[in-house]
Amino acid sequence: MNSENDTICAIATGTGSAGIGIVRLSGPESVAIADGLFRGKRRIRDLKSYTAAYGQLVRQTEGKEELLDEVVVLVMRAPHTYTTEDVVELSCHGGPLVLKRVLSAVMQAGARMAEPGEFTKRAFLGGRIDLSEAEAVMDVIASGNERALDASLQQLRGGLSKEISGLREKILYETAYIESALDDPENYSLENYPEHLRPLLSDWNDRIGKFLSSVNEGRLMREGIRTAIVGRPNAGKSSILNLLLGEERAIVTEIEGTTRDTLEESAVIGGVQLVLVDTAGIRETGDVVEQIGVKRAREAADTADLILLVVDAAKALSTEEEQLLYDLAEQDRLGETGGNAPLILLLNKNDLDTVITKEETEKALENAGIRREYRILEISAATGNGKTELAEAVQSLFFSGKLEDSQERYLLNSRHEEALSEARAALGRVRESLDAGVGEDFYTIDLMAAYEALGKIIGETLEDDLADKIFREFCMGK
């Protein structure tokens, strides 16, 4: 059984070749293990915290010292380290074979291989960071765009923790006041207390609602906006994909139906990550393979966060395009999931003589009955004209200007959403008790339920198995 008192080790840098690679140790025997392997002018055990030394790493092989590598050793002593334990980092040459040999020697000397996320888990258990900050560590590593990185760093700096902790303190204060008044009515009065509590409940509920409204934005920043590129054959869908990627990824020809299946790629435009899905041209066809492609194109549009409908502006709207608009309008009318995805209609080939205007296109959308939010843009996949306007349209559809200017950008996830929903429901029950005129002693039960639910976000009230599950999702060496 692994113990939290074990000294752990792992390769903390990437698995490929590099100039430098780092083997990290953390735990009570870190310094002693490194000292036993190191040969230099100074002993590792004599180094002060945050001091480095240059030398060689060796191990005993058949009574002889085998050279492993020339290294720089950095010693960091508890409690002022990432894990709050003694930490030693061995900066080696960055070849995979070298790092594996050094790691093997460290394990033979008494350390064990760290589990995924175990360094960060120890930082959490040591009280250096809370759970929301620990989750932000992995979000920083996995960030695929500037927005996600900024939000992750804000959360890592404790922005979310301060917000949640402040809210919990207010709830706890009111709970403690009620309990004190019930126990000592001579010194603490509950007269007109419901009138005092009502505005507080409204404020807390608004704050929680603000967090909940940003959960989807957090998902989009973290995972990217799933974007289906749809339209009739030869409208320029694959050319739009290549334009956004900045490379010739999709095959483009004058032959209709070239794209038979969906093609998925990721691109960042204007600091926003799009997961682009290029689809087969939507039209009536007797080709069995193309029929499958058209079916998948419609499925991609149904499950997308954003739909880019590409129209060849040098030709009149086709019956297939009009039917697609009516299909989208039917989703809007029925309130289906796909109807939530905003639509950006791209009038492509504006570098040529066009026959469709933005006004005519808007009228076609109105006639079809489109209710979802949409934008109509002119663009040229050939020249790149309109790409900046497209980036601005995506930002306006998914990320409010208020969010852009604010530092309150957090990558809230489904676990946070569940805890926030629990807290809001508990506060709702307090309001019901106020409306029903029941005794103040009933308030404390639900106030404490809200307090504990919010504690799950920062790890104050958390089951051990859930913490283990969260840290298992981390990468090795972190």
Image (cartoon, rainbow, N blue to C red):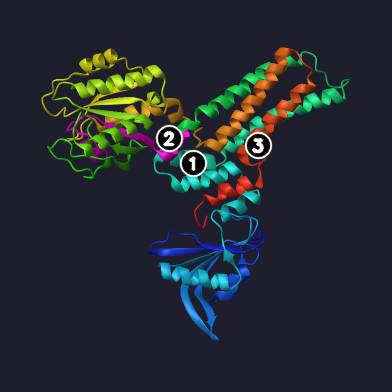
User: How many numbered markers are drawn?
Assistant: 3
Whichever of labels 2 and 3 marks the residue nearer the N terminus, that label is 2
Between the residue at mark 2 and the residue at mark 3, the CA separation in whole angstroms equals 25 Å
The residue tagged 1 is 152
The residue tagged 3 is 455
Task: Work out whether residue 208 or residue 339 is closer to the camera in this orientation and state it.
Answer: 339
Instruction: Note whether 134 is above or below 396 in the view shown.
Output: below
Please tell me in which quadrant of the rendered image residue 244 appears.
top left
- Indicate the amino acid at tag 1: Ser
Q: Which mark is residue 220?
A: 2
The magenta stretch is: 218-244
Q: Which residue is depicted at the point 54% across and 29% down? A: 211
Instruction: Specify whether residue 273 is painted magenta.
Output: no
Instruction: Note whether 148 is above or below 282 in the view shown.
Output: below
Query: Where in the figure is residue 349, as x and y percent of width and height?
Result: 16, 29
Locate the N terminus by quadrant: bottom right
